[in-house]
Image (cartoon, rainbow, N blue to C red):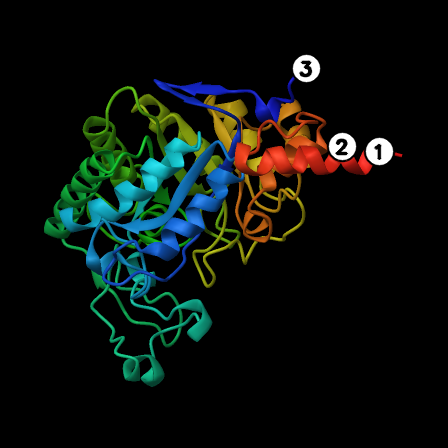
Amino acid sequence: MTTPLLFQPLRLRGVELPNRVVISPMCQYSATDGMANDWHFAHLARFALGGAGIVFTEATAVQREGRITHGDLGIWSDAHVEPLRRIAAFLKSQGSVPAMQLGHAGRKASMQRPWHGNGPLDSADHDRGERPWTVLAPSAIAMDEGWLVPQEMRLEDIEELRHSFREAARRALEAGFEVIELHGAHGYLLHEFLSPLSNTRSDAYGGSFDNRVRLALELAADLRAAWPADKPLFFRVSSVDGVEGGWTIEDTVVLARRLKSLGVDVMDCSSGGLLGSATAARVKRFPGFQVPYAAQVRREAAMPAMAVGLILDGRQAETVLAAGEADLIAVGREALNDPNWALHAREALDADPEYTAWPVQTGWWLDKRCKSLAKP
C-alpha cells in the first residue's frame, strides 16, 4: 500500500521530518516573565504523543517588551533555556521535530490576555498587577482607537532588535530546537514593517517596497548566519492584509523569492491580522481558505510552502498535498480539539490499521480493542 503524502517523510537540510503534519504556534498566555512551565510542557507534549511531525512553540518573544501579553513565552535571557530544553528533549524523544517561532509583538504588545478581553490593558488588568509598558513599532501609529501609541523605532532600536534575534537563535539551539521560524505575520512587528498601512517611515526602512522588506531580509540573513547550516529556517507571513492599500499576495511572492535567496527554507502562508485579531479576521474564512496563498508562493517562488487555516482533517490535507498546493500542512485549533489529529488522519487514510504509529503504551491497547470489537 502506498503511504499517503501526508505521512511521507520530508528532508529539509539535515533534518528529516517523519511526516508533513505541523503543529502551528499557538499562544498560551500562561508564562511568568517569559518562563516555560508545566503547562507549556503538557500542551506541546500531547502533540508529539499525537504523532505530529513538527511541533512549534508559541510565538516566543526575543525581548521582554516584545511580548504580546504578560503571559507570553520568552527567550530574551539565558535563564529561559533550561525549561525549554526539557520540552524540546521530550518532543524529540517521541519522534517529533521540536521547533520554535521567534517574534516581537510591535505595536500589538502590552495587551490583555484574550480571556481578559483581548484589548488594551485596563484597570482590571492593573489590579491584577499587569501594567502596560512602552511599545515600539516602525511608525507611531496605534493599532486602533484606544490602543497604546507606539514609539517609532530608532535605528539604534533596530540594531538592538537584530542582536536580540541572533541571541534568541543561539538560545533556541542550546535548548535543543531543530527548526526556527521568523514571525512576520498577524500584525506583529515584522508585519508592521512590511505593510504600507502601518509603516510610514521616511528612512531606509520605510516608503518603497524594498525599504519596507529590508528588516525582514536583514533578520532572515542574521538568523541564517546564526543558525546551523544543516537546520531549517521558516518564515511566517500574512500573505495578504485583506485591507485596501495593504500588503498583497504579489508582494508575498516577491518577498519569498528574496528570502529563498538568503537561505529561508519554507514560507508559512497565513494571512490578515494587521488590524484587530491576530488571526485572519479581515479575510473571508472557509475550509482551506489560505491554501491558495501557499500554492501561489510554491508555484511562483519555487520554494517549499506550508498551508494553514481551517484544514480540518487528514483527507482534506492529503488533497492539498496531492494537488501540489503545499509541502507541509499546519494545524492549530483542530489540534487543540484533537491532539491526536495526526494519528486520526492516519486512520482516516487507512495508513495505520494496527495502531503501530501510536505510542506503544496506547497503541497496544487500541489494537487489542479494535480486534475484540471485530469478533462476532
Left or right: residue 275 compared with residue 128: right
- Residue 148, horizontal then vertical, whole percent: 29, 71
Q: Quadrant of the N terminus?
A: top right
Left or right: residue 56 compared with residue 8: left
| Lower position in the chain sequence, tag 3 or tag 2 | 3
Residue, disc 3:
2
Element at label 3: loop
Left or right: residue 76 compared with residue 87: left
Residue 371, numbered circle: 2
Element at label 1: loop
Residue 322 appears anywhere in the view: yes
Residue type, numbered disc 2: Lys
Element at label 2: helix
| The image quarter in which residue 136 lies | bottom left
Q: Residue at x 54, y 32 (%)?
A: 360
Residue type, numbered disc 3: Thr
Residues at marks 1 and 2, CA–CA distance in whole angstroms: 7 Å
Residue 77 appears anywhere in the view: no
Residues at marks 3 and 2, CA–CA distance in whole angstroms: 24 Å
Q: Residue at x 45, y 57 (%)?
A: 278
When the figure is inspected, residue 210 is found, relative to residue 190, above or below; the finding is above
The answer to the question of whether label 1 and label 2 lie on touching residues, with beta carbons closer than 8 A, is yes
* Closest to the observer, 18 or 353: 353
Left or right: residue 206 compared with residue 1: left
Residue type, numbered disc 1: Lys
- Is label 1 or label 3 in front? 1
* Closest to the observer, 331 or 345: 345
| Lower position in the chain sequence, tag 1 or tag 3 | 3
- Residue 222, horizontal then vertical, whole percent: 20, 33
Residue 375, numbered circle: 1
| The image quarter in which residue 55 lies | top left
